[in-house]
Amino acid sequence: MEVLVIGGGASGMMAAISAASMGAYVTIYEKENILGKKLLRTGNGRCNLGNRELRTDCYHSRDNELLDGYFYKFDEDDTIRTFRSLGLIVKESHGLFYPFCEQASVVRDVLESNIRGYDITVRTDTTVESVVKKDPDSFVVTAGGVSKEFDRVILSCGSYAGIEKKDRIPSDHDGYAIAYSLGHTIIPVKPSLCALTVREDILKDVAGVRCEAMVNLVKDGAYIGSEYGELQITDHGLSGIPVFQLSHYVGVDPDGEYKLTIDLMPGMNEDEYISLMQGRMLQFQGASVRDFMLGTINSKLAALLIAQAGLKEDDTVSDETEDAIITLVGLIRCFTLSVKGTRDHAHAQCCSGGVPLREVDDDLCSVKTPGLYICGEMLDVDGACGGYNLQWAWTSGYIAGRAAGTY
Ligand SMILES: Cc1cc2nc3c(=O)[nH]c(=O)nc-3n(C[C@H](O)[C@H](O)[C@H](O)COP(=O)(O)OP(=O)(O)OC[C@H]3O[C@@H](n4cnc5c(N)ncnc54)[C@H](O)[C@@H]3O)c2cc1C
């Protein structure tokens, strides 16, 4: 049995090892000059390869209810066990899994070393251009103008996330185009886990500020979701984990109007907050608005909100400024920005959309083209920050490889 894995990234390497462990002859075609290039950049070079809290609500998919079945076959404990058997010691820190040595390169090297150990044929600098089903039991795969036959094909070409436009292969050769040519539909692919750009041109002076915040996303006036964590303000807009987590929803409806409302004093209930601010208004009567804000939120953000409330820092807290100060107090809990969009694919950690899960079976075999298997980010599954995307790569790679490698 000859199995071809197209794309030697996270899921493809796992699929190749899994197929070879079932006794198949496995070949990997990888367009880059090394296997697992993207893996090197994961987790800021530390590779957050899984999460103790593996739940399907940490994933987005149009067919979310199907995910349980895949994680039943390969879950977070299997990730630890499998990597240990491959030679990598995994450690857990606050529920997140990392290689013990905290080097993403070692995760890649361990996978590659096992690929060599199984005698898997690896062709790097090889971009697959087309896959054609020849007869019920074989595929003709063309790469670099040369065609070869394989019994089964695993598509693990990943998404555009983290890839500069100039480094992308032409879209008619990418994994989605290959899946489409073999009968699959493609749910529109968009960046997820990325920063958001905003319409307002008021953030330049506060770029670089980081603070704890509750970030809420609203679409056309309807609440979508909230995330708490460290907000980072950038030249382009907003970043940080809470913004990354919400980015999945932005742009799903191209005509939707998305807004972020930011609570810069999260964790305080409304009554507590009102009484605190009423107390400060008395305490700082006759003092400057700057002093009224000093000791509350980040001072650069305070200056921005003072201006947004129509005040000057030297204005005095008094009856005349009371209305504007009430506006300022409201802005601290509900600073609203209009979202222009997500940053582009190159600045995203993953993409949402892709091949619908209902177009593959329990073994991730295509229901459109039997003998074709699909795994990793090419499928319509994208996870939250915290190792969930790599967990999906290991789970789906393992399942697809095992099934494809079984005669
Ligand atoms: C900066 C960054 C940091 C990240 N950090 C984390 C993290 O810490 N934890 C986490 O869980 N997730 C993280 N992710 C997401 C994670 O890396 C991906 O979800 C995961 O790599 C997807 O695996 P994959 O196998 O589907 O795709 P990839 O790993 O992208 O592999 C696809 C491979 O296919 C190759 N390929 C594509 N088309 C062809 C073709 N036509 N012919 C031949 N080869 C082809 C590509 O070159 C690539 O090597 C991060 C992503 C980025 C960009």
Image (cartoon, rainbow, N blue to C red):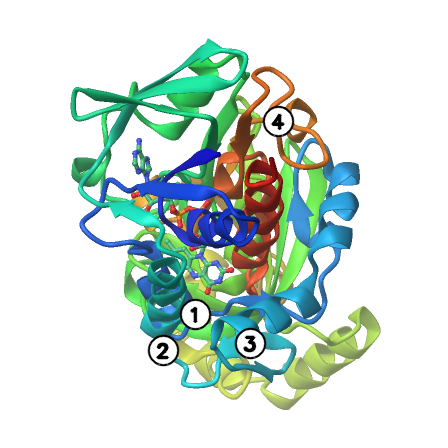
Q: Does residue 50 sit above or below 30 in this rendering?
A: below
Q: Residues within 10 Å of mark 1 (few under 14, many from 20)?
A: many
Quadrant assignment, res 253: top right
Nearer the observer, disc 3 or disc 4?
Answer: 3
Residue at image position (46%, 26%) is: 151
Residue 321 shows in this picture: no
Residue at image position (68%, 35%) is: 221
Residue 105 shows in this picture: yes
Q: Residues within 10 Å of mark 3 (few under 14, many from 20)?
A: few
Along the viewing direction, whichever of 101 and 3 lies nearer the viewer? 3
Q: Are marks 1 and 2 in contact (CB under 8 Å)?
A: yes
Identified by mark 3, the residue type is Arg
Mark pair 1, 3: CA separation: 16 Å
Q: Residues within 10 Å of mark 4 (few under 14, many from 20)?
A: some
Q: Which one is earlier in the sequence, the residue at label 4 or at label 1?
A: 1
Identified by mark 1, the residue type is Cys
Q: Which residue is mark 4?
A: 356
Q: Which one is earlier in the sequence, the residue at label 2 or at label 3?
A: 3
Identified by mark 4, the residue type is Pro
Q: Which residue is mark 1?
A: 47
